[in-house]
Image: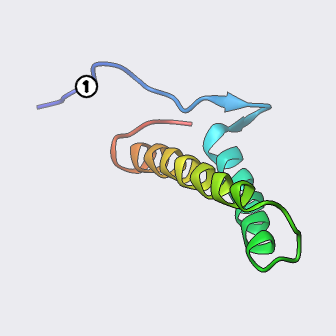
Amino acid sequence: MLTFPLAVVTVPFFHGKPINIWFGLVLAVMITFQLLTGLRVIKVPNRVHRYNGIGIFALAAAHGLIGFMVWFEGWIY
């Protein structure tokens, strides 16, 4: 028996690339910044380091959620 999804869901695009790709690139920059501020190569107040960590967590959660939905739920690019 054939079953069809109720709706086709696509991943949003930004400047011609899927948003998940952009999230990964921004995460790489944020993690590099977090590493450099944690090692005190770049000196910033501690709250900047803390808020960057919170941002990394939130963006990584969104990045992972979209990735799982593409892999397991059949979202398409």
Q: Where residue 58 appears, x then y in whole percent?
A: 53, 47
15 left or right of 9? right
Residue at image position (38%, 40%) is: 74
Q: Is 57 or 20 nearer to us in this picture?
A: 57
Query: Could you tell me which quadrant the C terminus lies in?
Result: top right
18 left or right of 64? right
Residue at image position (51%, 28%) is: 10
Please identify the residue farthest to the right as the structure is shown: 42
| Amino acid of disc 1 | Phe
Q: Is 22 or 45 nearer to us in this picture?
A: 45
Residue at image position (88%, 69%) is: 42
Query: Could you tell me which quadrant the N terminus lies in?
Result: top left
Q: Where residue 25 appears, x then y in whole percent?
A: 73, 54
Q: Where 41 sits versus 10, above or below?
A: below
Q: Residues within 10 Å of mark 1 (few under 14, many from 20)?
A: few
Dividing the picture into quadrants, the one containing residue 12 is top right
Q: Where residue 54 appears, x then y in whole percent?
A: 57, 52
Instruction: Find disc 1 in the rendering and name its residue.
Output: 4
Dividing the picture into quadrants, the one containing residue 45 is bottom right
The secondary element bearing badge 1 is classed as: loop
58 left or right of 3? right
